[in-house]
Image: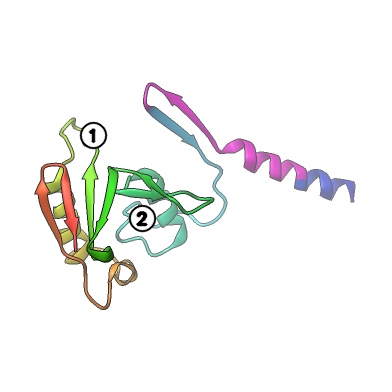
């Protein structure tokens, strides 16, 4: 019995201590304990298993994030969302400090391309597309300016 309790205690401590976030000048390093199947892909749009989706979610930032405890909306690539027309329009205001790994600024054209070419018409798995549908329609997107996008 003592050995079983010790083993359970050791596993819990390992799980809690192996997930840490170390910040150094706006850079983060995540140390994760992985138990389970290996990811099949690191592409968030083609992931069809939980492990792949979890890893892709750690690697790529979306427009927003959801707080894991209270489900509140947190900023991601978008610093602010504005909801208009009784919820039929969502305006996303991109942050000014977001860049691709080559130093190029991420802008509204990048978001429009990703939405139209990769998600709506491209490689996204059908279950992801189904989640994004509203009344059987895929939301449309348009660029308002270099840092603003409107979803309808």
User: On the image, numbered disc 1 is attached to which residue?
Assistant: 101
Q: How is the image coloured?
A: rainbow
Out of 79 and 123, give the one closest to the viewer: 79
Residue 70 in picture, x, y percent from top left: 52, 52
Point 19% across, 32% down: residue = 102
Quick check: is 75 in the magenta stretch?
no
Rendered image: mark on residue 56: none
State the CA–CA distance, disc 1 to disc 2.
Answer: 20 Å
Q: Which residues are magenta?
A: 9-26
User: In terms of image quadrants, where is residue 40?
Assistant: bottom left
Residue 92 is left or right of residue 61, and the answer is: left
Percent position of residue 17, x then y: 63, 36
Q: Place residue 53 in its image quadrant.
A: bottom left
**Circle 2 residues within 10 Å: few <14, some 14–19, many ≥20:** some
Provide residue 41's location: percent of width, then percent of height. 36, 55
Specify which label sits upstream in the sequence, 1 or 2.
Answer: 2
Q: Residue drawn 26% across and 51% down?
A: 82
For label 2, the residue is: 41
Relative height, residue 61 to residue 129 (above, below):
above
Q: Quadrant of the C terminus?
A: bottom left
Q: Label 1: few (<14), some or many (≥20) within 10 Å? A: few
Q: Residue furthest right?
A: 1
Of residue 143 and residue 44, the one placed in the foreground of this image is 143
Which of these two is toward me, 110 or 12?
A: 110
Residue 22 in magenta stretch: yes
């Amino acid at each position: 019995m003592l050995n079983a309790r010790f083993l359970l205690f050791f596993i819990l401590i390992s799980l809690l201590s192996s997930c840490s976030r170390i910040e150094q000048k706006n850079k983060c390093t995540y140390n994760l304990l992985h138990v389970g199947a290996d990811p099949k892909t690191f592409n968030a749009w083609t992931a069809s298993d939980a492990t792949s989706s979890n890893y892709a979610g750690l690697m790529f930032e979306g427009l927003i994030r959801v707080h894991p405890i209270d489900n509140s909306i947190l900023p991601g690539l978008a610093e602010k969302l504005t909801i208009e027309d009784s919820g039929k329009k969502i305006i996303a205001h991109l942050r000014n400090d977001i860049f691709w790994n080559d130093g190029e600024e991420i802008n509204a054209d990048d978001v429009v391309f990703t939405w139209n070419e990769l998600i709506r018409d491209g490689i996204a798995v059908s279950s992801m597309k189904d989640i994004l549908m509203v009344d059987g329609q895929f939301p449309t997107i348009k660029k308002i300016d270099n840092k603003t996008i409107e979803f309808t």
